[in-house]
Amino acid sequence: VGSDKQNGSFLVCLPAGKNYALNVSKKDYLFYSENFSLKNRNPDKPYLMDIALQPIKIGEKVVLKNIFFETASFQLKDESKVELERLVSLLNSNPGISIEISGHTDNVGKEQANMVLSKNRAKAVYDYLISQQIDPGRLTYEGFGDTQPIADNHTEDGRAQNRRTEFKVMGK
């Protein structure tokens, strides 16, 4: 769907009662991805999202919200391919940038196991990018376990946010 050239807004009609993945991209900006559900929403009320894209610059991070793994596994699920292809496209369109891929977990389980899992998940994304002919010299990966939470680990929603894969622009 294309957006308004003046203010970037757009309107799309989606059937209620389903889950959706959203991807937004613009030249010279980092893409944005999100999962959202319309399962328990009133179909008569609009669902509004305000998305501010980040320019490509060193230090900017993007959470890859459409990267999926089985519980306690670092095997990428097939539904991750769309998000991974967006990352490949971003890297191909901007051959000067390098990134760090990072894996993160919640605080459930043993600290050492979470550190290993997070590193293996980041490496799975790294390996996929290399398989798509991205120069490994432009990529690094790291696992941080539960050491960098972005939400409260005392709620399921918070733990879900902390279980993430993201990338950070390291060079441009």
Image (cartoon, rainbow, N blue to C red):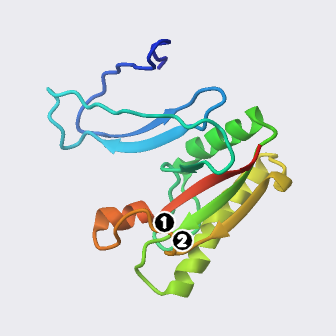
- The residue under label 2 is which amino acid type? Ser
Judged from the image, the secondary structure of the residue bearing numbered disc 2 is loop
Q: Which amino acid does label 1 sit on?
A: Glu
Q: Which residue is most to the front?
A: 58
Cβ atoms at labels 1 and 2 below 8 Å apart: yes
Q: Mark 2 points at which residue?
A: 73
Q: How crowded is mark 1: few (under 14 residues within 10 Å), some or many (20 or more)?
A: few
Q: Position of residue 143 (x, y in %)?
A: 62, 71
Tell me the quarter of the image containing the C terminus: top right
Above/below status of 45 relative to 3: below
Query: Residue 82, image x and y in percent?
Result: 57, 41
Q: In terms of depth relative to the viewer, which is nearer, 69 or 158?
A: 158
Asked if residue 135 lies left or right of residue 118, the reply is right
Number of other residues with Cα within 10 Å of mark 2, as a class: few under 14, some 14 to 19, many 20 or more: few
Residue 149 x, y percent position in the rendering: 45, 68
Give the residue number, with chain letter if any, for mark 1: 70
Name the image quarter holding residue 14: top left
